[in-house]
Image (tube, rainbow, N blue to C red):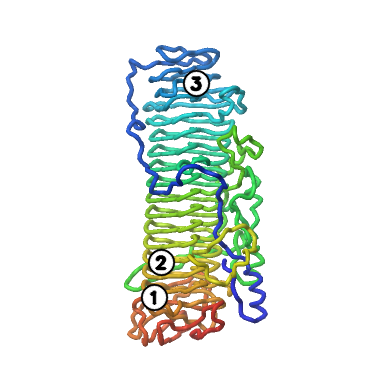
């Protein structure tokens, strides 16, 4: 939350020391010297070549390999069996079937050769290394034959040498790799990774079940997925693209498929761009939000970190202990001691019949048990901190349990998302752009985070649990239906690096940060926060849309909080909360806004109605928490008109004497003319 200037009373002096921590943008990037032009989301295409969908083959001309426990019968040209290893050395189509209890398949063809492997009921286990390795080819396609069931299992320890010493996955390819078809493939990666391509990886179909000690699926240069069913249990990352040398590579593009991913670290991690156009996603990371990656004092949660393979990456710092905060300010504590926020019984009614998201109901933020499958993943975690990065496709040792993470742009245009993450649910070290999709998010840290610009123009987003709901250097909401519940700020806009320190390099904490803003131009937004509701370290603009804020119950935060100017020119907004740090809009506004304080705290679940002089109802809301002050604005509020506010047995009548009626600019205007 933003640092506040408190009034000169003993209670507020205590509050200023308590609320000194300032949440700012965090950077979770690697410092690498990369070659090539840095790509952005618009540079990445989700389409793949027609050949990547090709599943048909001529069985009569293909080379057929039939495994029989410890031997293989080869019928055709291009493949040789010797000492438990099938070596494919020429371009062509190869049909693999039968069970091999201890052996390997190695593709070692010419660098211009295209090799197709048809898995038709193949079950291959290796006790010495990877059961399927591509050492050289132009491209290899693995087709899962229709209705076939296939299995690959590798050794717990590899015994490799020479040019194979860097092989570290159940399916490992040094060149481009495609997986397609309609059959199934079960991968048991006992050493490190499930599927690795050191070039481009494309998956267009099939039913893949991957259990891996480290990463489930990895393509160094890129990963493109257009379809298929995925069930991934990963000791580290679920799906990863990790080219750190070339800034034009290292991206992930998903345009279809059904995903169930349980990972101890990130579910999807792209070194550069992460782009999702469509798909169904059920993602749990780090044991889920109940196993939050941070505590309120800024330290890693030991119950979560003890299962991780490193320390410190992406951790948020500078947050006070929630128990101490709640005792000093009256803020609702988190965790098991935090009471549930009950649902409102009556949906808020906005001007012109508009309805805020989810009926304005407060979301319950209660502790839930760690899913059984998430618990199981920790049993296979390998501490890779001591691994040789030159011999591993997963050399990162930082702790990160985000659901969708991009080192560059992150763009989502569609899909259905169920996310339960110990760390940020959606995170970019650059920009986030959401134009569609349906999201159900429970986060142990931020629901959505961007180091730079964050834009939402469509979709349905429910963030039922988070530390901060939505965070970016700038945040622009122009559409969509958004419901945010946060134990700290609902929406936060701040610049700088979140290093876990209160030292800010001499920056004035109370001055507006240049280039930082929150802008609402459309959509339906409901925020239920224990910290600031709408918080900008720079400016705040409300130009359209429908916004409801159920703000803080403690005097150290405000339903609206900004350091620069807050300008309202359109849209409807009502914000309720405590009065200590409340702010109204600035006099740069062209639409009328009114701030009113009731004589005493209003009980939770008390209906508030605001009517004009003719008795027409303009707002009807029911805050699931206690409150005392309210800010409201809409095109129907006119200067010179009177309005009646009724909350239970308490009523207030106020005249909109100016464009901005009622001061209460918190840190910037001490006691400035609030309507009492």
Q: Which residue is mark 2?
A: 520
Residue 645 in the image: above or below residue 51: below
Q: Residues within 10 Å of mark 2 (few under 14, many from 20)?
A: many
Who's the residue at 39% across and 16% down the image?
Answer: 63
Q: Position of residue 397 (x, y in %)?
A: 61, 43
Q: Residues within 10 Å of mark 1 (few under 14, many from 20)?
A: many
Who's the residue at 55% across and 31% down the image?
Answer: 189
Between the C-alphas of marks 3 and 2, the distance is 57 Å
Would you say 549 lies left or right of 386 here? left
> Which one is in front, 502 or 345?
502
Judged from the image, the secondary structure of the residue bearing numbered disc 1 is strand
Residue 247 in the image: above or below residue 639: above
Please count the marks in the image. 3
Who's the residue at 40% across and 26% down the image?
Answer: 148
Residue 533 visible to an observer of this rendering: no
Q: Which residue is mark 3?
A: 105
Mark earlier in primary sequence (1, 3)? 3
Mark earlier in primary sequence (3, 2)? 3
Q: Residues within 10 Å of mark 3 (few under 14, many from 20)?
A: many
Judged from the image, the secondary structure of the residue bearing numbered disc 2 is strand
Q: Which residue is mark 1?
A: 619
Judged from the image, the secondary structure of the residue bearing numbered disc 3 is strand
The reply to whether dot 1 and dot 2 touch (C-beta < 8 Å) is no
Q: Within the image, what quadrant is residue 224 found in?
A: top left
> Which one is in front, 437 or 510?
510
Nearer to us of marks 1 and 2 is 2
Between the C-alphas of marks 1 and 2, the distance is 19 Å
Q: Position of residue 231 (x, y in %)?
A: 47, 38
Mark earlier in primary sequence (1, 2)? 2
Q: Within the image, what quadrant is residue 50 found in?
A: top left
Residue 222 in the image: above or below residue 343: above
């Amino acid at each position: 939350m933003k640092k506040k200037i408190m009034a000169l009373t003993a209670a507020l002096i205590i509050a200023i020391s308590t609320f000194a921590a300032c949440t700012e943008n965090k950077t979770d990037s690697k410092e690498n010297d990369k070659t090539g032009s840095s790509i952005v989301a618009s540079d990445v295409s989700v389409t793949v070549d027609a050949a990547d969908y090709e599943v048909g083959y001529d069985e009569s001309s293909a080379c057929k390999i039939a495994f029989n426990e410890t031997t293989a019968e080869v019928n055709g040209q291009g493949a040789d069996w010797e000492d438990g290893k099938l070596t494919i050395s020429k371009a062509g189509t190869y049909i693999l079937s039968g069970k091999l209890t201890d052996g390997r398949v190695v593709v070692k063809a010419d660098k211009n050769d295209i090799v197709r492997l048809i898995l038709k009921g193949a079950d291959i286990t290796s006790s010495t290394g990877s059961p399927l390795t591509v050492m050289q080819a132009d491209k290899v396609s693995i087709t899962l034959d229709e209705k076939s069931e296939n299995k690959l299992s590798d050794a717990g320890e590899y015994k490799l040498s020479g040019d194979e010493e860097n092989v570290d996955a159940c399916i490992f390819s040094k060149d481009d790799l495609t997986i397609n078809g309609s059959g199934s493939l079960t991968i048991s990666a006992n050493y490190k990774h499930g599927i690795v391509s050191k070039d481009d990886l494309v998956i267009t179909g099939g039913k893949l079940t991957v259990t891996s000690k480290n990463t489930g699926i990895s393509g160094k240069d890129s990963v493109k997925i257009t379809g298929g069913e995925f069930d991934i249990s990963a000791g580290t990352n679920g799906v990863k693209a990790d080219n750190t040398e070339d800034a034009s590579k290292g991206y992930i593009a998903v345009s279809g498929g059904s995903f169930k991913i349980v990972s101890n670290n990130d579910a999807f991690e792209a070194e550069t761009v992460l782009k999702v156009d469509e798909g169904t996603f059920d993602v749990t990371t780090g044991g889920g939000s109940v196993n939050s990656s941070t505590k309120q004092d800024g330290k890693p949660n030991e119950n979560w970190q003890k299962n991780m393979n490193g320390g410190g990456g992406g951790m948020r710092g500078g947050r006070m202990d929630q128990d101490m905060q709640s005792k000093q300010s009256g803020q609702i504590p988190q965790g098991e001691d935090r009471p549930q926020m009950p649902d409102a019984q009556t949906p808020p009614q906005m001007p012109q019949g508009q309805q805020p998201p989810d009926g304005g109901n407060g979301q319950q933020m209660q502790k839930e048990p760690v899913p059984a499958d998430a618990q199981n993943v920790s049993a296979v975690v390998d501490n890779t901190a001591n691994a040789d990065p030159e011999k591993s496709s997963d050399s990162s040792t930082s702790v990160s349990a985000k659901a969708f993470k991009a080192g560059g742009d992150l763009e989502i245009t569609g899909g259905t998302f169920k996310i339960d993450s110990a760390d940020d649910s959606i995170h970019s070290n650059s920009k986030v752009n959401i134009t569609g999709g349906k999201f159900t998010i429970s986060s142990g840290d931020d629901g959505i985070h961007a180091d730079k610009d964050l834009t939402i123009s469509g979709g349905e987003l429910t963030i039922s649990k988070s530390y901060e709901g939505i965070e970016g250097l700038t945040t622009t909401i122009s559409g969509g239906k958004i419901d945010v519940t946060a134990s700290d700020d609902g929406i936060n806009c701040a610049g700088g690096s979140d290093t876990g320190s209160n030292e800010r390099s001499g920056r004035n904490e109370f001055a507006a940060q240049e280039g930082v803003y929150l802008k609402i131009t459309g959509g339906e937004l409901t925020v239920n926060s224990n910290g600031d509701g709408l918080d900008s370290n720079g400016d705040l603009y409300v130009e359209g849309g429908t916004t409801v804020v159920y703000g803080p119950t403690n005097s150290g935060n405000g339903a609206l909080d900004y350091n620069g100017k807050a300008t309202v020119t359109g849209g409807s907004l009502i914000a309720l909360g405590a009065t200590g740090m409340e702010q109204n809009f600035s006099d740069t506004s062209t639409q009328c806004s009114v701030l009113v304080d009731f004589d005493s705290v209003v009980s939770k679940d008390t209906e508030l109605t605001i009517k004009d002089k003719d008795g027409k109802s303009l707002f009807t809301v029911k805050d699931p928490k206690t409150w005392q002050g309210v800010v409201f604005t809409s095109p129907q509020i006119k200067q010179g008109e009177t309005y009646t506010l009724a909350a239970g047995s308490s009523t207030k009548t106020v005249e909109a004497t100016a464009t901005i009626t009622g001061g209460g600019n918190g840190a910037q205007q001490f006691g400035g003319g609030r309507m009492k």
